[in-house]
Image (tube, grey):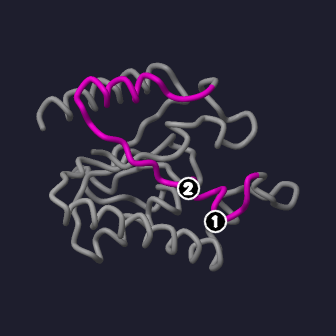
Amino acid sequence: MVFLIECILNQNSRDIGAASYKAMNVKVINLCMKYHVGMVQIPCPEMTCLGFGRERKPGQSIRDILDTESGRRCCADLARIVGGRIKEYIASGNKVLAVLGGNPESPGCAVHYDGDTGRKLSGQSGIFMQALFRELSRIKIDVPFLGIRDCRSDWLASDLQSLELFFRDR
């Protein structure tokens, strides 16, 4: 199974104007179905921490709000819940293949790597993804974080090709 961000399964959870698809990213979902990979939805950290409307002052970015003490605490709380769920699935004999994150500019869910290893997230990653990475490290769970960049069709095509190879090798 994979744990994937809410907006892959429900584009309506994205901030107004940020959806790449009308309802869901069918291409990612179809690929999971093709390889019989279960999907567990990670709640949207932006909505969890800021509400559906992502309330903020004019000119204030979502990342600026998430990257505050209270925003980081909210993301850490959500990361503990998701990390606990991942741990429960693994303890029950399930294999968690990856965490599927989001677009490179996503304030909560971007996935960027530190160095060439592709195993440690950099500070450019979304605030929630950084918190989830730290939580999984704390509870000694090592799963890859993979970005699903659906904001550009060429990036998505590349990510889907990599994801298919990843699933095929499992």
The kind of secondary structure element at disc 2 is: loop
Dot 1 and dot 2 residues touching (CB under 8 Å): yes
Please provide percent x and percent y for residue 129: 45, 59
Crowd tier of the residue under label 2, counting other residues whose Cα lies within 10 Å: few below 14, some 14–19, many 20 or above: many
Left or right, 78 with reference to 21: left
The N terminus, quarter of image:
top left
Amino acid type, callout 1: Leu
Q: How packed is label 1: few (under 14 Cα within 10 Å), some, or many (20 or more)?
A: many
At horizontal 26% and vertical 50% (from top left) the residue drawn is 118
The residue sitting at 73% across, 33% down in the picture is: 17
Q: Nearer the viewer, residue 139 or 162?
A: 139
* Left or right position of 47 against 169: right
Tag 1 residue? 66
In the image, farthest residue toward the right: 58
Q: Is residue 50 magenta?
A: yes
Horizontal side of 145 relative to 148 (left or right) equals left
The structure residue drawn at horizontal position 57% and vertical position 73%, both measured from the top left corner, is 72
For image coordinates 35% across by 52% down, the residue present is: 113
Residue 139 counted in the magenta span: no
Taking the image as shown, residue 95 lies to the left or right of residue 30, namely left
Q: Position of residue 90 (x, y in %)?
A: 21, 61
Rendered location of residue 56, percent (x, y) = 81, 60
Q: Report the magenta residues as a range.
A: 23-52
Q: Quadrant of residue 15?
A: top right
- In the image, residue 155 above or below residue 127: above
Amino acid identity at mark 2: Gly
Q: Label 1, label 2: how many angstroms apart (C-alpha)? A: 7 Å
